[in-house]
Amino acid sequence: MGVRLLRMEIRNFQGCKHLVLEPNGKNLNIFGQNETGKTTVASAWTWLLFDKNVQNQSTQKFDIKPLNENNEPIHGLETLVKADLDVDSCQLALEKKYYEVWEKKRGSSEEIFSGHTTDHYISGVPVKKSEFDQEIKNLADEKIFRLLTDPFYFNTQLHWKERRDILLQVCGGISGAEVIESNDDLVELFDILAGRSVEKHKAVLKRQMNAIEEDIKKIPIRIDEVNRGLPDITDINADNLQADIKVMKEKKKEKEQELSRIENGGEIAQKNKRLTEIETELQQIINKYSEEYLESITNAKANYSNIKGQVDGIERQIKTKKEDIKTNNYTINRHYEFNKKQLKDNWYELQEKKKALMGQEYEGDTICPSCGQLLPEEQVEEARKNFNLNKAVKLEELTKEQDGVTEKGKGLNGKIELLKKQNRDIENEIEKHEAEKKKLQELVVELRSEIDELNEKAKASHYQENFKYKKKSLEKQAIEQSIGELKHNNVKVISEVCQEIAKIEDEITFLEKEFKKLDDHEKGQKRAEELKVEEREFSNKHEELQRQMYLCEQFEKTRAELLENKVNGRFKLANFKLFEKQINGGISPTCRTIYKGVPYNTNLNDGHRVKVGIDIINTLSAHYNFWAPIFADRMESVTGDIETGTQLIKLIVSKNDKKLRVEVEEKGKMKEAV
């Protein structure tokens, strides 16, 4: 789409009282000294389209109206900007008027300033602001319009991320496959990435490398802890220790045998043997005596378990029946009674309706609404009969509905009574079960008492009443006393042998601890070697991750070069730096405009900035397929020719022109301003 400015009229806009431009779609040169209104022309154009000045400020941040010598707005003026456009050979007139609103307050003849208003016109027809804005949007989005009409907008008004996004949209990105295919060293990335993006894989690599680095840091500390924990084995000989331990264990065995001989002298051994025989005979007496009660105890326990099981079964039945009563009560209270209340409320509501209906009397018209005369008596009577007939029909319907409610209530009462009867029957059954349970519980108590009594009789204390048991017990006591007297005489000798055995055991414990130091030392060294192996494995893995990180960074650098070459290939003058090298060797996205090696935002002069800006507009216009008038300020700094496929309106500082001077160029190309 192509848009060209045919005519533009400006009146009372900022410092411009009245100006008419008639380029008729051709290039236009506007000459003037500083502060003569050149930039005002460009601001009038952007205000007409977007309610903003050329610096992209909204109307709240700049003065539209002319100012007096005190720098205050001049009242009573109407600001007007009108532009006649050629849009693909079709004419379109856009007009905007901005003026003051004066109102009279109630009770006062004096008008008071109350604000401003703006009128909008399309081809001379008044329209709403929304319609006006939509007409401009139909041409192009505001940002695109500003991009393609102001050579400075791209580089001064947009954030670098926005500039970068626009360039990538215009020129397209570089696929991963294209990057890898351009560099044979990156071929293995296909398998390494496994479908992930390079950015995501770098993030994964970074996490893994950080984790491994932390593990590698810890290993020397762990090895040092192991080494510091190793026991000192300088003076320890494994063979000598084993020989010493064997000798000491043999000595202990000999002393234990000596102790056994002393403790189990011939007479003591004989008496111990007889003591064992007596204890066996006593146990036989106990077993025989207990057999007399065993069968009775077994039978009593069987009866106890049977009756106890019956009690438990009855308790479960009682619990189930109580749950049935609870369920029935819930149904009655929460369901049937609730429904009864609703039916009752419904019945009274219908009753009220019947009363209200019965109280109604015929109040129809008795006078003709057309002529104002009384209606015939028969006509009034007929209307009254129809009213009473309808009233009777409605009463009958309400009565039937009320009877239906009554029947439903009776049905609910029947259901409630049925559930209450069920509850009474269940309560009677529960009483019978409780009585049966009580009898069985009394029987359980009796059986428990019987079992306890039988167990008491079977206790060993009762065996003492047996003559044989008493006789054997006395014999056992006599033998135990005799053994004690014999042992007392050997106490001193036994004590000395026990002390020797204790010393031997202490020596064995010391030797075994010394021998364990050898085992602990060997295990510690083995663990230290294992940690060193882990350290090497971590290092190898870290090197592999670093190698993959290097490939990813090479990928990004290659993509950056390809992308910059692709983008810069679309422009004749402008070059763009899309990536910055970081200290760590990586790259980060950016967007810096450069002309012949000079950055736009630092050392580039105004003339070259204009050339670069128009070069960018040419490429963007071709991409968006939209060509609009370019308002190029600072054109006095431009030398040489500038090519553009659209209309160019040059704002040129001229010291000799104290007022604006306008010239229309006849040629398609711009020449250096003279």
Image (tube, rainbow, N blue to C red):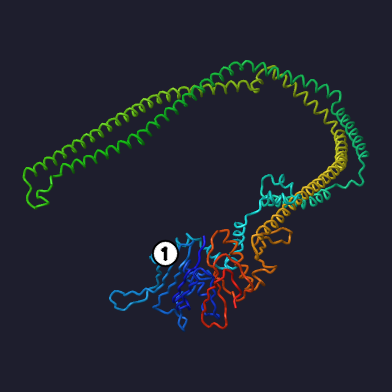
Query: Label 1 crowding class (10 Å Cα cut-off): few <14, some 14-19, many 20+?
Result: some
Q: Nearer the viewer, residue 374 or 188?
A: 188
Q: Which residue is labeled 1 in the image?
A: 129
In the picture, measured across the screen, residue 238 lies left or right of residue 5, that is right
Residue 300: horizontal and vertical position, in percent? 56, 19
Residue 296: horizontal and vertical position, in percent? 58, 16
Q: Nearer the viewer, residue 393 or 56?
A: 56
In the picture, measured across the screen, residue 42 lies left or right of residue 427, that is right
Relative to 407, is 506 above or below?
Answer: below
| Residue occupying image coordinates x 11% and y 52% | 370
| Residue occupying image coordinates x 57% and y 76% | 652
* Image-quadrant location for residue 147: bottom right
Q: Helix, strand or loop at disc 1?
A: helix
Relative to 51, is 332 above or below?
Answer: above
Residue 654: horizontal and vertical position, in percent? 57, 80
Relative to 144, is 610 above or below?
Answer: below
Q: Nearer the viewer, residue 632 or 331?
A: 632
* Image-quadrant location for residue 577: bottom right
